[in-house]
Amino acid sequence: MSVKFETRIDETFRNLKAQGRAGFVAFITAGDPDLETSIQILKGLPQAGADVIELGMPFSDPMADGPAIQASSLRALNAGQTMIKTLGMVADFRVSNSTTPIVLMGYYNPIYSYGVEKFLNDAKKAGVDGLIIVDLPPEEEAELCLPALNVGINFIYLTAPTTTDERLPAVLRHASGFVYYVSITGITGTKKAAIGDIEKSLARIRAQSGLPIAVGFGISTPQDVADVAGVADGVVVGSALVKTIEAGLENDGKSGPNLVKDVLSLAGELAAGVRK
């Protein structure tokens, strides 16, 4: 299946290429630490410099995520976040922002429970541009990837240092929007990869795909962002932002007075790394 539609993701990466820079991709978990605070952060990210937003769908067993994002998912669920509320956040965001791409990232179980057809229709209506589902490999593309493409939502596949040249064609066959390169083996928010290793892996992917490549996992500082921006088309930061949310909580777990400001301030510092 060739993709015959265009999303905000395609337009954004085309504009970034024309500007000669990589994009800053910011990740937060929907509903963390509560719905109202999460919406404020979401709406403030584009002005802070986010070119693309990854919005995590809270799940009780986020196996690929490190402690920080696992904790954010638990906070959101404990605050009453649901899939309906997550899609509602996107719809609310779209009232004032029609250009910044939103990619929902997470696991298949909540989507399956919601109902795939209903989820895709509701996501498209809300203004979702892409999906990253970490536990659905290409062998399961009929579950969600192909139905998503049919309604005009990009399906973004993960690649990793362990993805061989022989495996890449299967991963890339129906990928769209961009390719997400996981720069380390293991979970999010732990270690970091050498730039030289990242560059070699991206060259292997580019040899088989013309899609933009965003690099995530192990990127936490403005200098990390700047370094990766030198070799990638997009740079993803999640754990550092989520840790700042956690640091801004009061003792009772409620959002502190400076939480939103501190998260958006960090986002601005990280975003500066792609604009050097």
Image (cartoon, grey):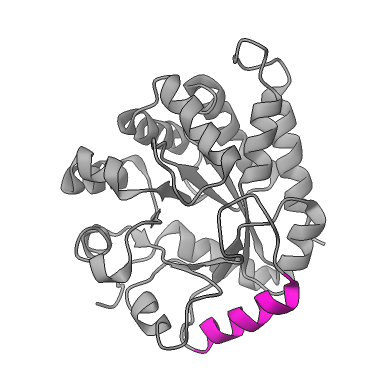
Q: Is residue 200 magenta?
A: yes
Q: Is residue 227 magenta?
A: no
Where residue 146 appears, as percent x and y from the top left, is 23, 65
Residue 120 horizontal side relative to residue 39, left or right = left
Where residue 259 appears, as percent x and y from the top left, is 69, 24
Residue 6 horizontal side relative to residue 215, left or right = left
- Residue at 75%, 43% (x, y): give it: 268
Where residue 250 appears, as percent x and y from the top left, is 67, 14
Count of residue discs = 0
- For residue 203, say whether it is visible: yes
- Residue at 60%, 79% (x, y): give it: 202
Question: Up-down: is 68 above or below 139?
Answer: above
- Residue at 39%, 26% (x, y): give it: 81
Span highlighted in magenta in the image: 194-207
- Residue at 68%, 43% (x, y): give it: 240
Question: Up-down: is 36 above or below 207?
Answer: above
Name the dominant secondary structure of the magenta segment: helix
- For residue 31, say whether it is visible: no
113 vs 37, nearest the viewer: 113
Indicate the quadrant containing the N terminus: top left, top right, bottom left or bottom right: bottom left
Residue 220 horizontal side relative to residue 187, left or right = right
Where residue 102 appears, as percent x and y from the top left, is 46, 48
